[in-house]
Image (cartoon, grey):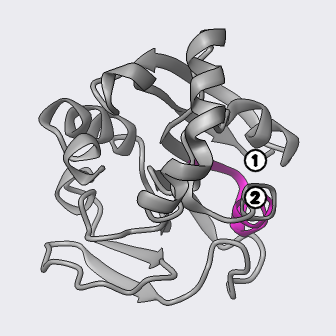
């Protein structure tokens, strides 16, 4: 999966999503720090939560890394200007609770920047994704290939300002690769 979501094409998409990051930033599921060199140069510090602490590479960005789940974050309400999630929501156990937490920690007017792979709108491909998701989930460390994000984000109270759903160069070809990216705002 790392090869797919770390490819040159996907890194370009990540950089485009991250170009909007500003203010006090929280990254959900920082992983190995793939996003760090892609943030705008004015970003000097971020807070990151991840359930699995890994070695985050040294960077010009200071990272305050906290070992906790997006399902239950210790931050007060209205703490962050921007929350970022790139390819992390797919492996969160309870998506609804995590999105509610993201909403809670964002300041009013704050933005949620998301980039996720997910469910195809093609009924045949979607059927295959649903059928193979339990097996894929086991071999891909909890990753789900059949989630649709826009409705879930909106159910948490966000207003989607920008949303793109497109084919992307990820996955084995039989499952087609679709990504969801955009900006959701807390009002």
Q: What element carries label 1?
A: loop
State the residue at coordinates (75%, 63%). Answer: 94
The image quadrant of residue 158 is: top right
Q: Nearer the viewer, mark 1 or mark 2?
A: 2
Which percent across, then down, holds residue 135? 54, 51
**Magenta highlight on residue 11:** no
State the residue at coordinates (50%, 54%). Answer: 85
Q: What element carries label 2?
A: helix
**Magenta highlight on residue 102:** yes
Q: Give the range drawn in magenta.
A: 100-112
Q: How many marks do you count on the picture? A: 2
**1 and 2 marks in contact (CB < 8 Å):** yes
Work out whether residue 10 can be spotted.
Answer: yes
In the picture, the disc for residue 103 is 2
For marks 1 and 2 on the same chain, the one whose residue lies earlier in the sequence: 2
Q: Quadrant of the C terminus?
A: top right
The image quadrant of residue 146 is: top right
- Does residue 23 appear left or right of residue 78 in this picture? left
State the residue at coordinates (19%, 29%). Answer: 9
For residue 64, above or below residue 186: below
Q: Residues within 10 Å of mark 1 (few under 14, many from 20)?
A: many
């Amino acid at each position: 999966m790392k090869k797919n979501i770390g490819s040159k094409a996907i890194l370009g998409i990540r950089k485009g999503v991250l170009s909007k990051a500003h203010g006090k930033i929280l990254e959900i599921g920082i992983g190995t720090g793939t996003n760090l060199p892609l943030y705008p140069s004015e970003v000097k510090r971020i807070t990151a939560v991840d359930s699995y602490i890994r070695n985050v590479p040294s960077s010009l960005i200071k990272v305050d890394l906290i070992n906790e789940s997006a399902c239950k974050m210790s931050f007060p309400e209205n703490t962050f200007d921007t929350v970022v999630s790139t390819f992390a929501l797919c492996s969160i156990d309870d998506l609804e609770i995590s999105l509610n937490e993201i909403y809670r920690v964002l300041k009013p007017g704050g933005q949620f920047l998301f980039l996720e792979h997910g469910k195809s709108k093609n009924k045949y491909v979607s059927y295959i994704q649903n059928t193979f998701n339990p097996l894929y989930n086991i071999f891909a460390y909890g990753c789900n290939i059949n989630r649709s994000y826009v409705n879930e984000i909106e159910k948490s109270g966000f207003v989607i300002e920008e949303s793109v759903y497109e084919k992307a160069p990820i996955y084995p070809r039989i499952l087609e690769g679709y990504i969801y990216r955009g900006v959701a705002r807390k009002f």
